[in-house]
Amino acid sequence: MEWIFTQLGVPQNLHAQPWHIVFERNPPPWVWFLILVALIGVSFFSYSNIRGARNAKATLSVFRAIALLVIFLLTTQPSLEWPQEKTEQDFVEVLVDRSTSLQVKDAVDVQGKLISRADFQDEIMKNSVWETLSKTHTLNWTAFNGNSTTIQNHTTLPLADGNRTLIASAIHETMQRNMGRPLSAIVLITDGRSQDSVNTTTIRQIQSLGIPIFTVPLGDPKGINDQSVVSVEAPQKVFLQDQIPIQAQISTKKPNEKIHVVLMDMNSKTKLDEQDAISDQDGKINVTMVGEPKNTGEMVWQVAIEGVPDADPSNDSQNVSITVVDRPIRVLYMDGWPRWEFRYLKNILLREKGIESSIMLLSADRDFAQEGTTPLSRLPKTEKEFSVFDVIILGDVPAGFLNATQQKGIKELVAKQGTGLLWIGGERSTPSSWRGSALEDLLPFRGSLDLPRLDQAAFMKPTESAARIGLLRLGNKQDDELGWPIEISANGESWAKLEWAQRIDHRDVKPTTEILATAVSRGSVEKKQDGIQQESNQETPLVLTMRFGSGQTTYVATDETWRWRHGRGETLPERFWIQLIRHLSRSGLRNSAGVGLQVDPPRATINQPVRISVDLAGVAVGGTVVVEAKNTKNGKTIDVELKADSGDQYSAVWIPSNDGDGVWNFRIRQPQIAESPEAKLTVMYEDQEQLNATPDHETLEKLSAATQGRVVEARDIETLEKLIPNRSFVTKIPIQIQLWNQWLVYVFLVLVLTIEWIGRRVLQLM
């Protein structure tokens, strides 16, 4: 056979393998039978009437039958066939959740130690069941959170740092990737937390393909408390010695929970502020910390939760970067007459380090010397002359002392440059004389400007809005939570009463105005039996602030804060006025070259609009204004073209895209500036993982039930070997060698015919 196979061209590797004959034209068995009978019958009949020895005739009949049979077989196109089979294994997709919710420590290892869900998941990955499954299935591993990533080594998973989970998206991508392939099952290892849901269409697609989903739930379904710092907001630039408000949102799962929050300077590792906060019924806390920078340059501060470690320590703190500018705050103070408030506020400005003041009493005669650390010989006339000041204070000044050009200039500076404007109400001119003027729009209230006097003496009471932005903190650490001294509150000393204040109707307050303090009488605050203060509806706005363009304007409806000096000296009035002035000055911070670049807000989420504004005072533009932004995370660079607002102001709104998370550094690319100012923007995904990390095992159960799968607990992970169906299939790919066109077959046929012919001659049968 070796020689025959070689002559027929059979590959050497098939010689020893089983084979059989197949026919391309294979008649039914009954046809084979009839033909075989007919061939044998014809062969023997052809020799039946010929004289000769019986054995000789029988032998020749056999040779003729063989020849006829070979001829018939050639008509059926016979071939030698070696059976060959190819087994195509099915696929099992294993989806592994790697979001930040897996950092929660609510899982227990074999030793009873509390570990994170991610560590527990790592233990599952080391189980031998995966090696067993890989022998009968092709395993594909995918790590997912907001995106999906194929992984080669399932024992070395990527970090669990995804700030969102999209289970439905991961399943949909898996289905698309396996179209046309024998997919046996999907194994989903997750805690069930997801920002999307598997819709009906996807479920029906899975059901139509008969693909079961086996879910391996992670985490404690009862949940475990997790305190987290959700967001932190702070000014981008501040002055040295400023009291900087850091606004933070804290989240916890428990209502009315006491949480200790601290503000740390990461450069010096010193604690700047701390306070205890109580969560609301929804577990949210809005807290404002206040810190004072000690050095100039880039500062990194951190808001952190202190106390017993919770489920996920990774979200217990957030950092914020602040640039500290070391230059004096330039203040212009104009008043109409030497009232008591003017005298003491003037001395406060002269005494305060870090403030460069110019003070003008507009009712003074020619011999009255204007005061301040930088005295002015005359009132500024143009917008450029006013632009050197960070804050302008208007006391009881008649509107007529400032002409239309001066008023318009101040208004433009507040709107475009961010100059702060501070109003101090007075009995004579403010705000009554400012009706119809250009600066009327900068008052935080509307209606009649002839404000009546309060019926009786009142006390100042700060609001939650003041506490939120870190203002009116006049007390020490031992004072109440708003930092307001008890002696000047409604239940305090009688000398703290403000004998004169203006009444502002709540209905006249503009919609964008925030009320920082109200005027209350001693009888308007009553103590309940449980010690909680009851507010009266008779409170009227006393300190109001309003955003106007790039700047802010604040109105103080009393000039009696000097009364707080009784027994305390200048401490309380000084804190009151300096805090307001410093707050107003920050919105107008510009670099020394007169060029400013601002990104507002400094922290944003994906798809949140961000305003980019540039001040090119004294710079020749000569074309378009372009700001370049570079992502420090992935190196991506974009250009944002700004449009002219008015004068030297340019701005644009930019929306970070889905791949735009990270820290962005902004600089002015066009026009070219020797020392372009820089601004930073931190873009992040809205981290729903940190807001709620409670496992959602119910959703996993529904998903498995809908797809004819099963929930497999981690302790029973070995059962996957029996549960996952085998959808491998065998493909037959036989190897055939045709015989009907082989020379060896025809040689055999000729040989048989020749033997019969020779036999007939020898036996003289012809």
Image: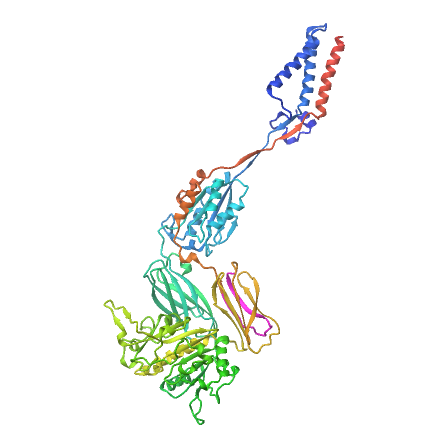
The x, y position of residue 223, in whole percent, is 36, 53
The x, y position of residue 267, in whole percent, is 45, 69
Does the magenta segment cover residue 225?
no
The stretch in magenta equals 660-681
User: Does 41 sit above or below residue 656?
Assistant: above
- Name the foreground residue: 388 vs 204: 204
Instruction: Report whether 572 appears left or right of 399.
Output: left
- Name the foreground residue: 642 vs 357: 642
Residue at x-position 56% and y-position 62%: 636
Instruction: Report whether 595 appears left or right of 59.
Output: left
**Colour scheme of the rendered structure:** rainbow
- Residue situated furthest left in the rendering: 529
The x, y position of residue 596, in whole percent, is 53, 74
Q: Quadrant of the C terminus?
A: top right
Residue 747 in sight: yes
The x, y position of residue 174, in whole percent, is 51, 46
Image quadrant where residue 62 sits: top right
Q: Quadrant of the N terminus?
A: top right
- Name the foreground residue: 407 vs 468: 407
Image quadrant where residue 709 sits: top left
- Name the foreground residue: 280 vs 716: 280
